[in-house]
Amino acid sequence: MNLTAVGIKNIRFPVKIREMAGGHQATVASITLQVNLPRRFRQNCVPTFLSVLKKFQNDISVEIFPELLREVKEELQAESAQLEMTFPYFIEKYAPITKTPGLMEYTCRFTGSTGHDGDDLIMSIWVPSTTLCPCSKEISDYGAHNQRAEINLNVKFRNFIWMEDLITMVEKSASCEVYSLLKRPDEKYVTEKAYENPMFVEDAVRKVAEAADNHPDILWFSAGVESFESIHKHSAYAEVLSDTMR
Amino acid sequence: MNLTAVGIKNIRFPVKIREMAGGHQATVASITLQVNLPRRFRQNCVPTFLSVLKKFQNDISVEIFPELLREVKEELQAESAQLEMTFPYFIEKYAPITKTPGLMEYTCRFTGSTGHDGDDLIMSIWVPSTTLCPCSKEISDYGAHNQRAEINLNVKFRNFIWMEDLITMVEKSASCEVYSLLKRPDEKYVTEKAYENPMFVEDAVRKVAEAADNHPDILWFSAGVESFESIHKHSAYAEVLSDTMR
Amino acid sequence: MNLTAVGIKNIRFPVKIREMAGGHQATVASITLQVNLPRRFRQNCVPTFLSVLKKFQNDISVEIFPELLREVKEELQAESAQLEMTFPYFIEKYAPITKTPGLMEYTCRFTGSTGHDGDDLIMSIWVPSTTLCPCSKEISDYGAHNQRAEINLNVKFRNFIWMEDLITMVEKSASCEVYSLLKRPDEKYVTEKAYENPMFVEDAVRKVAEAADNHPDILWFSAGVESFESIHKHSAYAEVLSDTMR
Amino acid sequence: MNLTAVGIKNIRFPVKIREMAGGHQATVASITLQVNLPRRFRQNCVPTFLSVLKKFQNDISVEIFPELLREVKEELQAESAQLEMTFPYFIEKYAPITKTPGLMEYTCRFTGSTGHDGDDLIMSIWVPSTTLCPCSKEISDYGAHNQRAEINLNVKFRNFIWMEDLITMVEKSASCEVYSLLKRPDEKYVTEKAYENPMFVEDAVRKVAEAADNHPDILWFSAGVESFESIHKHSAYAEVLSDTMR
């Protein structure tokens, strides 16, 4: 017997996400739901799902997400359910020298599943960063090619972790962090900082992995770094998978 | 010890794909390569990879793909390698009644991996189709909502299978097939055919699964159907995974 | 002398949009700014722009937008400026028969320019709809192919127009409207309604044009309808441009 | 009376493009067609269009394109027609020092229109490049942030121009060119070259404009440079429009 799942893809919904600083942040989520049903996924599954979603809409967090998922599963009388919620998330971040505040945008995702095999919950973040090529620096009399990169980290955790903390952890792993607002002293700082910290994509991804390995609350992770090479039209890419569930 | 893989993403390359009818078809592939190296993925890995790719460029098929992959692995002295090649593929298809020929475009992908755990090879296709809603037909005095859908099938196989055969198999699984050219008698045919064959996404995906189950050369498969609902802004989606490797 | 404009593309920012029903709606905008400067677009133009944006962030509407634009232009000492803000916008919409409420998502854009040639302001909306093919209906014994379509309308106006009113006007122009939530009696209604109102893309776009022509506050418009054909892999498309500025 | 145009969007078709070096290059085009018809754009317009396309399919160039367009217009008995063909185009390019050959991919587009107002033909190219920030270089003790950029140039011309020549002209306009294959001496060269040629997006776009202004066969142009900033999540952008038709 093959396993069949049915659901909906890419429904968009306004939600409020709980912030580490207290309060909530309004954003727009893209949602994918899949369920295993003893009977067909009837048309009225969508109204049922959306009414549960509406109930939770104004107070979403990775802590509350499993509750939302369980209620979806029960209301739909599903054997198992998988729910994925992806959204842009903004954090006020201070420029490194002038401390000018600016809003940085990160992509975040909660993925939860519940069913026969127990429950599972993954928190994912995508963080813009800078990589500067060690080889280019080493062989050149001056300069070094650098570029925007994107770091993805997916974690399963023991105790609750704030997205904000996860993002801060990841941002320290590349040649330099990315900011939305930089004045001249800040720009000097990030330029020199990247030059002092040359990293291949595999160096950056290993640093993310090391931080995740050392985090007391991370049980499992996978991470990837994609570097939009400034000297090529293709990307350099590296990924790492935690050896085992701790 | 965590596993780390490095590589390049989304490099584009012109290739020629072997056709079932004999001869080759020129197309443009998007390629992703990942390797596990005892040492770092040096800059010169890209020239090495591209020179192997160049050698195989004019005669690509799912039969030859493992050879290409093995040579990439050897030339890079990698412990393991994964190569993914995605490309648009055109097949001349005849309108159902007037038999007018027209070029249909399908997305295809070969994914190969080689390493400690042995070799693996997956052939994937994405096929445009039509689904017509059984519920809408049943409850309405006339008409029934229908829409474009996309069927994805991924297979591992025992003996060589032509993409053309796989595509033909999948095209029979929805409410109606999609064509690039339809004259009036053809349009009448596809309209009535879809109306006679109402299917939810889960019906279509189960029909694909049944065909794959019954295919003597398919060892494993996964399939998905996404329906771009004409009465909603979101998609309906269903997927199925073969129970086990045969 | 050639004209040169500089700016930033695709910066994302949380904003609150004034709703017709009163109150504000939180959403996430993608913003593009271009300015003509007597001198270079210095790095500190971005902080200046973002600080103006921050001031207006919590009360954006098409009425206020020109003020925001003027302040950006002045603060940057630009000769002229163009600002584009695109965002998802949600409206509670009732199912046609059961009146079940559901959130529909529309894409909206404000585009403003100010400079030597005076000021300009365009409001744009993208509205999901259903089209049902008249030819398919006519020649078939039963059924008719239909599909999701997207209607785009861009207007310049005399007096303030609510986006909500513009969206309602456009939604009446296709074979049937699209809803986020439909129960069985609703699904019967939309199926039959679409069947009773067959329309080619050019019929739908002309109906939009007629409504825009007759609107007392619309000075200029352009409109387009793209239909994601259920029987083909390509889209049918029609567009119309108002003859002249009234 | 408003002007209405109808057509098809995003149909994909394999074509062969005439190369400057002689011979043809096989690629896959995305095609958009719009026509003004005295009567409705009937279903059989698509077969007619595709049969004309098929006739020209194996020998496309910017020289032949107007012929293809005229034949489409005549066969469809249209008052006017607009045809757009976008495709990836590969050119063998030699690394700057080691002269290692590698295939570079560029996006190209032909846009033609024919009708009451006469004929028009635009050739467009999108060229990957590197920009290095002058400000970052000036204020930093070492290093300078740089990134991949994309240069777009659209031209109307007097005498035939090869895409290859246009691409070469544009590639000289940024801080450094982008290559698909670079060995160590090449990487040293591009790193140092970019560092020696710092450019804001407005500097690069003005250099493109200057070259276009000085080209004897270019009658009109527009150009844009988008820089995927390595220190930000947004892009810097500049564009220039030729003052007038010469």
Image: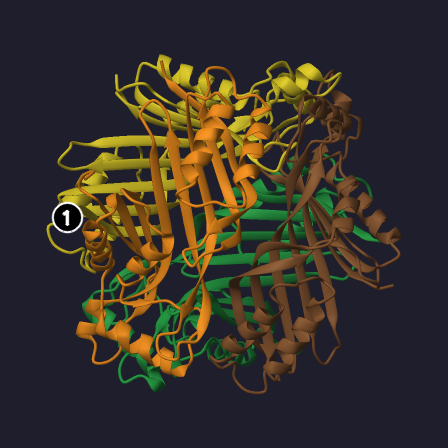
Chain colours: A green, B brown, C yellow, D orange
Say if A110 sits above or below B95 in the image. below
| Residue for point 71% across, 32% down | B95
Q: In which quarter of the image is the C terminus of chain C?
A: top left
Say if B26 sits above or below C61 in the image. below
Q: Is residue B33 left or right of residue B190?
A: left
**Who is closer to the viewer here, C20 or D101?**
D101
Does residue C227 appear in the picture of this structure?
Answer: no
Which residue was labeled with disc 1? Answer: C75
Kind of residue sitting beneath label 1: Glu
Residue B1 in which image quadrant: bottom right
Q: Position of residue C203 (x, y in %)?
A: 51, 18
Label 1 crowd (10 A; few <14 / some 14-19 / many >=20):
some
Q: Position of residue C164 (x, y in %)?
A: 41, 26
Q: Position of residue B149 (x, y in %)?
A: 66, 39
| Residue for point 73% across, 42% down | A76
**Who is closer to the viewer here, A61 or A140?**
A140
Does residue A216 appear in the picture of this structure?
Answer: yes
State how many labels appear.
1
**Who is closer to the viewer here, D219 or A235?**
D219
**Who is closer to the viewer here, C73 or B193?**
B193
Say if A76 sits above or below D43 in the image. below
Q: Where is residue A238 in the image (x, y as percent from the top left)?
A: 53, 73
Residue D165 in which image quadrant: bottom left
